[in-house]
Amino acid sequence: MTKEIIEKTKKTAALYFKDVTGDKPFELWKSFDKDLAKDLSLFITGQMYAREKIPHKTRQLITVASLTVLARRDELRLHIQAALNVGCTPSEIAETIFQTFVYGGMPAANGALETLKSVLEEKGLWPIRE
């Protein structure tokens, strides 16, 4: 493990997850296995999320789309907040969710839109004013 990866992990985690409400996966992992939690965090946040092949906004919109289709609403809540943190607008997130209904179905898209609305309400961004 290099100092560089540790620094990338800290930087990326601060960018994505600052002011995120709700349970964070890292805390869950850590409650079961502290060493494994650290390894997972260094890989996911310090190596995968920190890659610069695509912009952070694009990466988070892809994540929102994937979690929508998989109907993983708890994890989706976290990544909607991360998407907002990296500069995605509520309208961009909503459009990403709308684009998934063809592949994931309307129930998954509707659930994701409910999650988006809830996050926007919590952050004082509802109704969307763009």
Image (spheres, helix red, strand yellow):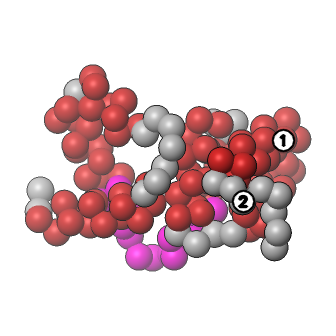
- The image quadrant where one finds the N terminus is bottom left
Q: Which residue is mark 1?
A: 110
Which amino acid is tagged 2? Leu
Write the residue at 56% across / 40% down: 75
Write the residue at 30% across / 66% down: 11
* Res 69 quadrant in image: top right
Write the residue at 27% across / 32% down: 30
Q: Is residue 123 left or right of residue 100?
A: left
Mark seen at residue 80: none
Q: Is residue 66 left or right of residue 29?
A: right
Q: Is residue 70 left or right of residue 26?
A: right
Give percent across and percent down for residue 31: 28, 25
Q: Which residue is mark 2?
A: 125
For mark 2, does the 10 Å Cα neighbourhood hold few (<14), some (14 to 19), or many (20 or more) residues? few
Q: Secondary structure at mark 1?
A: helix
Q: Is residue 24 above or below residue 97?
A: above
- Give yes or no for residue 55 being in the magenta stretch: yes
Q: Which residues are magenta?
A: 45-61
Farthest residue to the front: give it.
124
Give percent across and percent down for residue 126: 78, 56
